[in-house]
Image (spheres, grey):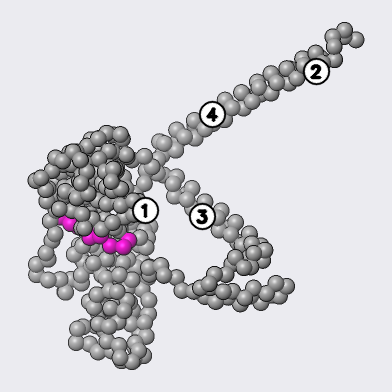
Amino acid sequence: MSDEPWWREIGTFLAFVYLYARKRAFRAWRRFEFGKGILVEGLYQQRGKYARPFTHSGMVGLVMVGITMGPLIINQFPDAAATEGERSSLILGQTAIQAQTVLSEKPRAEVVDYTVAEGDTLSSVAEKFGVSLETVLWANDLTAKSTIKPGTTLAIPPVTGVVHKVGRGETIYSIAKKYDVEAQNIVNWPYNSYANDETFALAVGQVVVVPDGVMPEAAPPTSPRYIARKTPDAGAVTATGQFVWPTQGTISQQPVWYHMALDISNRGAPDILAADSGTVILAGWPDGGGYGNRIIIDHGNGYETLYAHLSGVYVSSGQTVSRGTAIGKMGSTGRSTGTHLHFEVRKDGVLMNPWGYLQ
């Protein structure tokens, strides 16, 4: 039997337990870091390749949680399930649940059928759905001289342009050429799907929306193009809130609700200029996302500008630039079909129409 006091033996025992636990924890930490390093290196080398599987897996998980926990949450908190605009009659202990359906205000993604009412005209129907008259005519094989009667069913596309059924051998490039738009316009429409998201391959028979497309026989002899030109009075070192043109080229995509940006195309791939003075807060392609190589400049007055799809980046994060400074080179990286600049203006984090700010 030991002559040491009992409290010393307890102290020795606790010291041994501490050293043992520390050693085991250190080994576990090293194994974790080693595994994490291998995983990160693999994901970095395959950047962007696994984004889609991870996203899909996450969505499936959320759906399963919603299906499993949704009824329980509704039964536990029936009052929270109803709002002033949507009241559901939740009857506990009964099998019947009466609910009032509220139509979503989300923009349409597909063609809808509309039954002509008394007093409707082709123009009024087009105005009601926010599309051009020509869009309604093309979708229904009508002409400007056609008349409609109550009870007639009209197909209404979701946006001004053409709805095209893909034929054998067709690509987004051939379809874009047929309807006198840039292929990027088709890619920018968020509801178009592809057999291959990297090459934008199409499946025979699928339906593609061509925003701003024009039927070949209806195309005017001369199609006006907006031209983006460099503004000569660049060089300011203090942000002004008024932006100079960031490059030269043809405006291939106007700002619309699903693409609040200007696309400026130029096969010569000119330099991209800072539209106003500020500090670079992002430069490069950190996430493998659809913007590709891009630059974001914080102008210090609530405004930020974004320049995407670049083939080269001349600046780095934290660098201060003056208005008109060359910051990169036009390219076609990311979700892009050709050499162009995707230019955004943001005010307090909200996308703004660039036309209201360019000089």
Q: Earlier in the sequence, mark 2 or mark 1?
A: 2
**Which residue is the site of mark 2?**
10
Q: Residue 278: which numbered mark, if any? A: none
Tell me if label 2 and label 3 are in contact, CB under 8 Å: no
Distance between the alpha carbons at the discs numbered 1 and 3: 18 Å
**Which residue is the site of mark 3?**
59
Q: Looking at the picture, does residue 292 appear above or below residue 173?
A: above
Q: Position of residue 69 (x, y in %)?
A: 63, 59
Is residue 3 shown in magenta? no
Q: Position of residue 156 (x, y in %)?
A: 33, 77
User: Relative to the observer, which residue lies in front, 120 or 346?
Assistant: 346
Q: Crowding near pointer 2: few (<14 within 10 Å), some, many (20+)? A: few
Distance between the alpha carbons at the discs numbered 1 and 4: 34 Å
Q: Do we see residue 267 in this rendering? A: no
Q: Depth-wise, is mark 1 or mark 4 nearer the camera?
A: 4
Q: Residue 33: which numbered mark, if any? A: 4
Helix, strand or loop at disc 2?
Answer: helix
Which segment is the magenta one? 249-258
Q: Earlier in the sequence, mark 1 or mark 4?
A: 4
Under mark 3, the amino acid is Met
Helix, strand or loop at disc 3?
Answer: helix
